Amino acid sequence: MQIWCRVGVAWGGLRPQIRYFLSVESLEFHPQPLEISHKDVGKYFKVFHKSHYLANDALAELYPEDTAFTCQSAADTYSDISVSCSDPR
């Protein structure tokens, strides 16, 4: 089964009209995960925790299975990082 993600890219602060659909299978983990500095990140995530973002309460309620999937994927990918899905704050 292929799952598709809709991705929009911003250039110079302008949001393009074209959206790209990418297969989840074609996405790759970054070898050294970093926090993204963008004003919209806080709309969906509450905190960046070592290797991944933790979804905010509204997003976690809409997609309850994503938290476990994200944590397991991060743990499998980043064996050298202690992965936790609890809010570090």
Image (cartoon, rainbow, N blue to C red):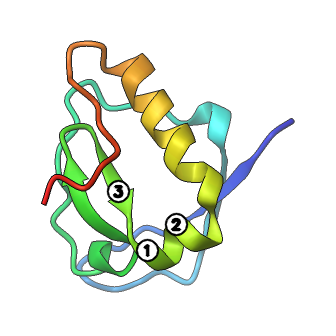
Residue 22 located left or right of residue 35: right
Residue type, mark 1 in image: Asp
* Residue 4 screen position, x and y as percent: 72, 52
> Between residues 22 and 73, which one lies in front from this camera angle?
73
* Residue 26 screen position, x and y as percent: 61, 33
Residue bearing the label numbered 1 = 57
Residue 29 located left or right of residue 58: left
Kindly indicate whether the residue at mark 2 contacts the one at mark 3 (C-beta within 8 angstroms). Answer: no
Q: Quadrant of the C terminus?
A: bottom left
Residue type, mark 3 in image: Leu
Return the residue found at the far top: 79
Residue 32 falls in image quadrant: top left
Q: Is residue 37 above or below residue 22?
A: below
In this rendering, which labeled residue sits more in front, label 1 or label 3? Answer: 1
Q: How far apart are marks 3 and 2 (CA)?
A: 9 Å
Under circle 3, the secondary element is: strand
* Residue 81 screen position, x and y as percent: 20, 22
Question: How packed is label 1: few (under 14 Cα within 10 Å), some, or many (20 or more)?
Answer: few
Residue bearing the label numbered 2 = 60
What residue is rendered at 36% in x and 73% in y? 10
Residue bearing the label numbered 3 = 54
